[in-house]
Image (spheres, rainbow, N blue to C red):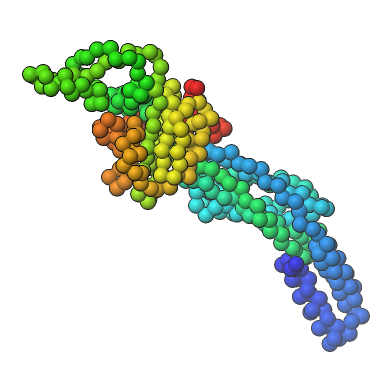
Amino acid sequence: MRPTRRGVAVVATLAFSWLMAWQYGSRSLSAIVFPLVIALLAAAVTVARTEAPTVTRTPVEPGFVGETRTVETAIEPNAPLSATVSDRVGASGLAVDGTENTAETTISASDRFRYDVRLEARGEHAVGPISVVVTDLLGLTKRRFEDDQTTSVLVFPKIYDLTGGSNPELQAIAAAADREHRGEFDHLREYVRGDSLRDVHWKSAAKRPDDELIVKEFDDDGDRGAISIAAECPPGYEDEMATAVASVGTYLLEQGVPVGVVLPEATRAPANGRAHQRAMLRALAVVEAGELDDRTKADADVLIRSDTTGTTVLVDGREIPFDRLRGRSSRSESPGGETRPAETDGEPPEVRS
């Protein structure tokens, strides 16, 4: 417990009054000294008997970079009080009013403390602990209570809309799903640009005098196969990698393709639907740098790498710069082209299950 500035002024006034009383007598100062002493003692007793308020933090919905979320905390004291509440916001990744990292307000009695934070960077960020400074009704003394609870705020990576990118290259990515789910072998035909080298029938091609390639054609039963996306990057390029995986994965899910992801420290089995996309985004929100083994990279249908040269998407031995796939967003778009899939509720874009 400590005196406030007003309390310090009262103590200083009492000290001065006592000094004057010692010099000139106390009779004329009694009307000033005794009320101040009583007020100061009452304030000290009131604050000393105050118990720590009950603090209940409300979970914060995950969101995308650039969005805003409301942090809400219920503060319930055992008796009516006047208090100043401040909540510590993570030094990076979140911002209050654009720059500050502390939210502060004054409350009385039971109240709910609310403020907005801007999601500035991908990752899992902490809000809290909260500090409640209780004062008496006259504002002479104060007491600080610290609550150790924190709230986690998960920020998903940016998602770019790929539908405005290079169509042949997007078709190459989507075609990887068709290769994983084929009907029975139907016939051989001549190679055309865009065919996968995996489908080349080398034995038949070797017999042709003109060196033209021959590919295998399969019956199409109408279903789409699953695609496995593997991703890796050195330290410092996690955000670029996460953005590329989230964008490519979302594009494929919207095409009805089950998608699985293999990250340096996490794996999600192929699936589709909104719940699966959300699980994928949660993994990408906290993904860290790392390298995959050669077997994992070879087994992946799509391999995404981010490094000093940029972010590339490898499909069938073809290296596609992610910047070329990005194109222009056809949905809600900010300067820079990234898609804000759900500005109202933070949900990822709807995908078909």
Task: Tell me residue 194's x, y (percent).
Answer: 24, 23
Q: Decide: is 148 above or below 65.
A: below
What residue is shown at x 74% (from left), y 63% (from top)? 143
Q: Is residue 249 left or right of residue 273?
A: left
Q: Nearer the viewer, residue 196 or 137?
A: 196
Rendering coords of residue 205 (x, y %):
15, 21
Q: Is residue 273 left or right of residue 13?
A: left
| Count of number-bearing discs | 0
- Say whether residue 189 is visible: yes
Q: Which residue does the image show at 74% across and 55% down from the upper left? A: 83
Position of 217 with respect to 96 (left or right) is: left
Q: Position of residue 142 (x, y in %)?
A: 75, 63
Q: Nearer the viewer, residue 157 or 209?
A: 209
| Residue, far right | 27
Quadrant of the rendering where the N terminus is positioned: bottom right
Residue at the limit of the structure toward the front, as seen here: 203
Q: Nearer the viewer, residue 70 or 172?
A: 172
What residue sits 78% from the left and 73% below the top? Answer: 11
